[in-house]
Amino acid sequence: MRAHEELRRDTLRFVLAAIRNEEKARLGAAVDKLNAEGKDEPARQAWLAEHRPGELDDAAVQEVLTKQAKMRRDSIEAFRKAERTALVQKEERELAVISGYLPEQLDEAKVREIAARVIRETGAKGPQDTKVVMPRVIAETKGRADGKIVSGVVSALLREQAS
């Protein structure tokens, strides 16, 4: 704030709001579940105090950051199609700020390497084995690679495998 980095300040405020919204959503979901189970107020309060569903751990915060980054990528794509270069640049700068708080992203070559290994390990023969391969690749690349890239790489490798 003192450096007058308005874009960074505004982006971080937006991310913090998204984190608070996620905390509220999880707390609300937990309360709804307890109500559905028929728990009375003291029982709900005790359970909430013990389990603290509204507090996000590092993995949950990283999920929120990943969602925010994905939103920016989708916006960039939409603005490019609409030829709105000023908005594309703004979203790219916001994405750069958010990316600074995420783990380093894997490049396509590394994703291809992981997918090829998983295909060998599972013995996948072609595109019909996508449901076997994708969950394992996603688990290994979670938060470090875009889902579209992972899906594209796995599909391409499985098509090659079938040929």
Image (cartoon, grey):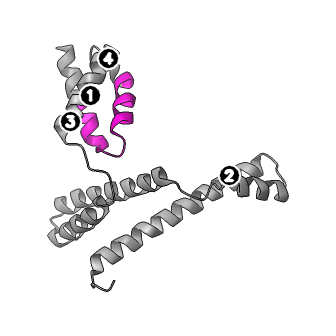
| Front residue (pair 76, 99) | 99
Residue at 54% from the left image edge and 56% from the top image edge: 56
Amino acid carrying label 2: it is: His
What x and y, as percent, mark residue 116? 23, 24
- Kind of residue at badge 4: Glu
Q: Earlier in the sequence, mark 4 or mark 1?
A: 1
Q: Quadrant of the N terminus?
A: bottom left
State the residue position of label 3: 110
C-alpha span from label 2 to label 1: 37 Å
Residue holding disc 4? 121
Residue at mark 3 to residue at mark 4: CA–CA distance: 17 Å
Q: Quadrant of residue 145?
A: top left
Q: Give coordinates of residue 11: x percent, y percent.
A: 34, 71
- Looking at the image, is mark 4 or mark 2 earlier in the sequence? 2
Looking at marks 1 and 3 on the same chain, the residue that comes earlier in the sequence is marked by 3
- Check the image and report above or below for 22 versus 12: above
Where does label 2 land, which residue? 51
C-alpha gap between disc 3 and disc 2: 38 Å
Kindly indicate the quadrant of the structure image that contains residue 131: top left
Residue wearing tag 1: 115
Which badge, 3 or 2, is on the more N-terminal residue? 2
Alpha carbon of mark 1 to alpha carbon of mark 3: how far? 9 Å
Label 1 CA crowd tier, 10 Å (few <14, some 14–19, many 20+): many
> Which numbered disc flags the more N-terminal residue, 3 or 4?
3
